Amino acid sequence: MLFIAHCTDKPGHLQVRLDTRPDHLAFLKAKGDALKLAGPTTEADEETPNGSLLIFEDADLEAAKAWVAGDPYGAAGLFDSVIVKPWKHAIGGGL
């Protein structure tokens, strides 16, 4: 089953993101092929990260929420909000 996670950073926490990025990337890589897409959302300048968007497979909604809760960014206090919900691929790209 596919899920999206949309995480929004707390304002003024860019350094937390930068400091925690290596651990976050290792966490994502450990998901293996079940992680379909991942990347930061940005400010209007298209450079400054302000959140994260993930598309991934998991067994069910509770498992998906539990996995996202383990993200080092969350443990570091980066996120202001986190939304995890089922997602259905309909058009584009080969997921």
Image (spheres, grey):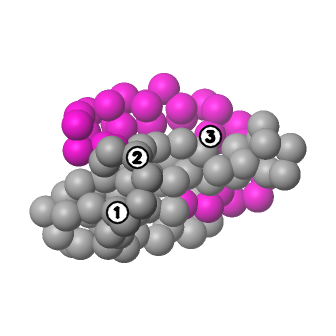
78 vs 2: above or below: above
Q: Quadrant of the N terminus?
A: bottom left
Q: Residue furthest left?
A: 59
Which numbered disc covers residue 89? 1
What residue is rendered at 34% in x and 36% in y? 27
- According to the image, label 2 marks what residue? 93
Dot 1 surroundings within 10 Å: few (below 14), some, or many (20 or more)?
few
Callout 1 amino acid: His
- Calculate the distance from the C-alpha at mark 2 to the C-alpha at mark 3: 28 Å
Residue marked by disc 3: 17
Identify the magenta region: 7-36
- In the image, is residue 26 part of the stretch drawn in magenta? yes
Where is residue 31, by image quadrant? top left
Identified by mark 3, the residue type is Arg
Q: Nearer the viewer, mark 2 or mark 3?
A: 2
- Main secondary structure type of the part rendered in magenta: helix
